[in-house]
Image (spheres, rainbow, N blue to C red):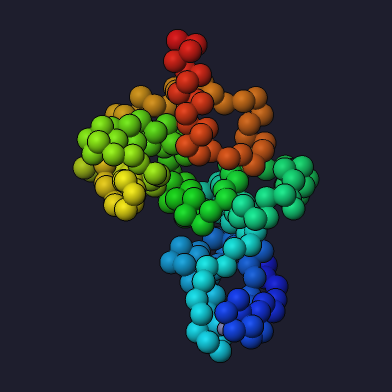
């Protein structure tokens, strides 16, 4: 079951009170429509009923997909201090087979959902992404701000990412063979902490950099 609560928020532009539905948890298995609404941005979209001001709502949300064995806690940066890791562990103590992740942006949340629904491992994905980011920086001779998982096809033997290049954050798609994913697996797995699966963990670019560094050092 998903759980919601109703809140009144005042529009930052005109001050009108708007009643909004806050989704504390979204259960992708029992409420597939909510999953769709989340992924297309509708669920976290605010539109003032008076002046029409639109914005993305930012509040903690737990996304739950037991069928695909993952749980993602979306904790926007602004709320990071209000919930401790311990609180989370206490709330979900006995879910050994569930991959648990903590993300701080909506884009990361969407990316994780796509990765896990594709049956892929996000640690390996981050390692591949870090390697391809270097490739894109060389190819474009520019800096790459970030990127997200955007392609996975076994028939085409491709895995790919969309990167944001340069000051204008121009989109650049870089794909590679699936073999690169296989080869990156030991790099990611050598960096797993004991009992890592028991915690809500942040697996992002920094984590991947550390994993790669650690792997090269111990080789
Ligand atoms: Zn307004």
Looking at the image, residue 130 lies above or below residue 80: above
Residue 119 on image: x %, y %: 43, 43
Residue 25 on image: x %, y %: 64, 62
For the point 57% across and 26% down, the residue is 192
- Residue 185 vs residue 57, the one in the foreground: 57
Judge whether residue 210 can be spotted in this image: yes
Judge whether residue 98 can be spotted in this image: no
For the point 48% across and 31% down, the residue is 208
Name the quadrant of the C terminus: top left
Query: Which image quadrant for residue 30?
Result: bottom right
Quarter of the rendered structure image containing ligand 1: bottom right
The reply, left or right, for residue 49 in relation to residue 176 is right
Name the quadrant of the N terminus: bottom right
Looking at the image, residue 176 lies above or below residue 38: above
Give the residue at the far bottom of this rendering. Answer: 50
Numbered label tally: 0
For the point 63% across and 59% down, the residue is 61
For the point 62% across and 25% down, the residue is 193
Residue 128 on image: x %, y %: 37, 33
Looking at the image, residue 100 lies above or below residue 26: above
Give the residue at the far top of this rendering. Answer: 219
Residue 125 on image: x %, y %: 41, 37
Give the residue at the far front of this rendering. Answer: 167
């Amino acid at each position: 079951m998903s759980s919601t609560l109703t809140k009144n928020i005042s529009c930052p532009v005109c001050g009108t009170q708007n009643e909004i539905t806050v989704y504390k948890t979204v259960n992708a298995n029992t409420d597939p429509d909510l999953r769709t609404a989340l992924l297309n941005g509708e669920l976290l979209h605010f539109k003032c009923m008076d002046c029409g001001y639109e914005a993305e709502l930012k509040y903690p949300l737990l996304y739950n997909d037991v069928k695909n064995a993952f749980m993602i806690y979306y904790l926007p940066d602004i709320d990071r201090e209000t919930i401790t890791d311990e609180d989370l562990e206490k709330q979900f103590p006995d879910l050994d087979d569930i991959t648990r992740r903590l993300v701080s942006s909506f884009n990361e949340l969407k990316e994780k959902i796509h990765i896990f629904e594709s049956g892929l491992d996000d640690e390996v994905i981050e390692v591949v992404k870090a390697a391809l980011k270097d490739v894109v920086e060389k190819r474009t001779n520019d800096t790459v701000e970030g990127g997200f998982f955007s392609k996975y096809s076994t028939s085409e033997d491709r895995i790919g990412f969309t990167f944001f290049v340069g000051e204008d954050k121009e989109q650049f798609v870089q794909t590679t063979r699936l073999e690169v994913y296989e080869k990156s697996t030991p790099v990611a797995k050598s960096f797993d902490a004991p009992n890592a699966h028991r915690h809500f963990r942040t697996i992002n670019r920094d984590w991947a950099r550390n994993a790669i560094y650690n792997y090269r050092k111990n080789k």
